């Protein structure tokens, strides 16, 4: 089976262009995720935190599948 050199060159060029386009798409996706994470962290940091009294959420009032308090959530993000 013989291949025409021009067809091989065209295929290689198309593959390279596709790879460059995919790399650019990944960079845009990473930037969007970074921007979203920064916005979420800013919102969480803007929340007023209780400094006295009963802190967090009463875990008995939550569904049994979600045994977590606000203090645990914000504490893990602030680190």
Image (cartoon, helix red, strand yellow):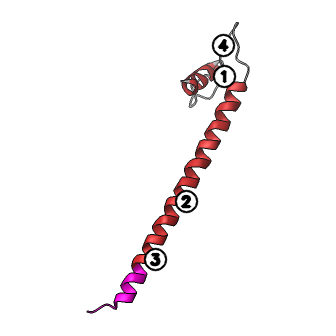
Q: Of tags 3 and 4, which is closer to the observer?
A: 3
Magenta region's main secondary structure?
Answer: helix
Helix, strand or loop at disc 1? helix
* Residue identified by numbered label 4: 55
Direction from residue 37 to residue 6 in the image, left or right: left
Circles 3 and 1: CB distance less than 8 Å? Answer: no
Residue under the image location 46 percent in, 66 percent down:
19
- Mark 2 or mark 3: whose residue is earlier in sequence: 3
- The x and y percentages for residue 52 are 70, 7
Q: Viewer-proximal residue, 18 or 79?
A: 18
Residue placed furthest toward the left:
1
* Residue identified by numbered label 1: 61
Is residue 19 shown above or below 3? above
Give the number of the disc on residue 45: none
Give the number of the disc on residue 14: 3
- Mark 1 or mark 4: whose residue is earlier in sequence: 4
Q: Of tags 1 and 2, which is closer to the observer?
A: 2
Give the CA distance from mark 2 to mark 3: 16 Å
Give the number of the disc on residue 25: 2
* Residue interval drawn in magenta: 1-11
Give the CA distance from mark 1 to mark 2: 44 Å
- Mark 2 or mark 4: whose residue is earlier in sequence: 2
Circles 3 and 4: CB distance less than 8 Å? Answer: no
- Mark 1 or mark 2: whose residue is earlier in sequence: 2
Give the CA distance from mark 3 to mark 4: 59 Å
**Location of residue 47 (image quadrant):** top right
Helix, strand or loop at disc 3? helix
**Location of residue 2 (image quadrant):** bottom left
Helix, strand or loop at disc 4? loop
């Amino acid at each position: 089976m013989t291949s025409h050199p021009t067809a091989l060159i065209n295929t290689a060029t198309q593959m390279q262009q596709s790879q460059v386009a995919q790399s650019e798409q990944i960079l845009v996706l990473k930037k969007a995720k970074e921007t979203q994470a920064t916005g979420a962290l800013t919102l969480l940091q803007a929340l007023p935190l209780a400094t006295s009294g009963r802190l967090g959420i009463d875990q008995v009032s939550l569904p049994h599948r979600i045994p977590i308090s606000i203090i645990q959530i914000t504490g893990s993000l602030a680190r």
